[in-house]
Image (spheres, grey):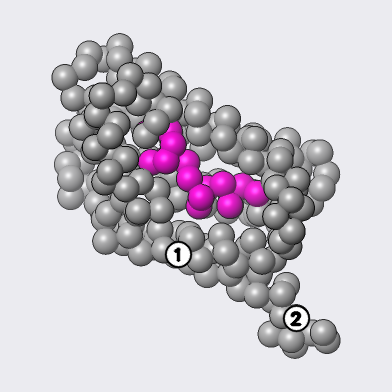
């Protein structure tokens, strides 16, 4: 039951970070004037890109940390700070600069692979989701755990795919105000999760904070 709660929190964390509802206005703007077939293909490509990047991050995260010479706890603190910065932007109903800059949005106008860049990367998947995936994948070295992590990623990507496929009716039904409200709710959840990740990392780096002997 405890493990189920941990994996559920990971799914919620990824959903909050990817925030597919906040991507809807950008998705509709970048695919404006295109037919439904093009939008469907773009949504498919975006979800596939997110899945591929996060699975690679989960599998190679251990190697990446060793190459960088950093500990998991230090990565938790850094990743948690990135998530908290993103949550502040979400609470203000904005796309964080950590995810995508205005220059990247403008440059994407003429690209034919919008599902990969900039919708898949960096609008949806970026430093925040990659950090969270590596942290969760590194929690235990068992292959069964890694398999469940990949399953969680697949579940989240399915939700992203469904949201983008239904971007037009969702955008019309909720409107900008409704999308902003959902974005702020996800931002609040992400802020709480970020604080939790940072606190765990700090305790790992400085055991005295938990009253443990150094």
Tell which of 154 and 115 is nearer to you: 115
Which residue is rendered at x = 63% and y = 35% of the image? Answer: 55
Give the percent coordinates (x, y) of residue 60.
71, 40
Q: Is residue 177 left or right of residue 155?
A: left
Q: Which quadrant of the structure image shows residue 89?
A: bottom left
The label on residue 111 is none
Magenta residues, dominant SS class: helix
Please state the horizontal and vertical placement of residue 3, each as a whole percent of the image: 71, 52
Residue name at image x 31 percent, y 23 percent = 111
Q: How many marks?
A: 2
In space, the residues marked 1 and 2 are separated at their CA atoms by: 23 Å
126 drawn magenta: yes
Q: Which residue is mark 1?
A: 84
Q: Position of residue 115 (x, y in %)?
A: 39, 26
Q: Is residue 176 left or right of residue 50?
A: left
Dot 2: few (<14), some (14–19), or many (≥20) neighbours within 10 Å?
some
On whether residue 186 falls in the magenta region, the answer is no
Secondary structure state at the residue bearing disc 1: helix
Q: Which residue corresponds to mark 2?
A: 207
Quadrant holding the C terminus: bottom right
Q: Can I make out residue 122 in this image?
A: yes
Q: Residue visible at 63% across and 63% down?
A: 76
Determine whether 63 is above or below 52 in the image: below
Magenta range: 119-134
* Residue for point 83% across, 44% down: 142
Location of residue 211 by image quarter: bottom right
* Between discs 1 and 2, the one toward the N terminus: 1
- Is disc 2 placed on a helix, strand or loop? helix
Task: Say few, some or many: other residues with alpha carbon within 10 Å of mark 1 (under 14 / 14 to 19 / 20 or more).
Answer: many
Is residue 8 visible from the viewing direction of this image? no
Q: Residue 134: horizontal and vertical position, in percent?
A: 65, 49
């Amino acid at each position: 039951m405890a493990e189920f709660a941990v994996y559920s929190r990971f799914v919620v964390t990824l959903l909050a970070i990817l925030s597919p509802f906040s991507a809807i206005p950008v998705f509709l703007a970048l695919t404006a004037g295109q037919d439904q077939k093009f939008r469907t293909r773009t949504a498919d490509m975006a979800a596939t890109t997110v899945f591929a990047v996060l699975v690679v991050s989960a599998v190679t995260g251990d190697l990446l940390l060793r190459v960088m010479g950093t500990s998991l706890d230090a990565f938790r603190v850094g990743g948690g700070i990135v998530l908290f910065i993103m949550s502040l932007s979400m609470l203000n109903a904005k796309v964080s600069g950590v995810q995508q800059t205005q220059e990247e949005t403008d440059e994407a106008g003429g690209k034919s692979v919008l599902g990969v860049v900039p919708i898949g990367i960096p609008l949806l998947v970026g430093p925040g989701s990659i950090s969270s995936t590596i942290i969760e994948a590194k929690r235990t070295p068992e292959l069964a755990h890694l398999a469940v992590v990949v399953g969680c990623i697949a579940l989240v990507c399915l939700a992203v795919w469904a949201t983008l496929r239904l971007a037009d009716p969702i955008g019309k039904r909720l409107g900008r105000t409704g999308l902003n409200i959902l974005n702020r709710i996800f931002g609040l959840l992400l802020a709480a999760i970020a604080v939790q990740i940072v606190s765990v990392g700090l305790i790992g780096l400085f055991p005295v904070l938990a009253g443990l002997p150094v």
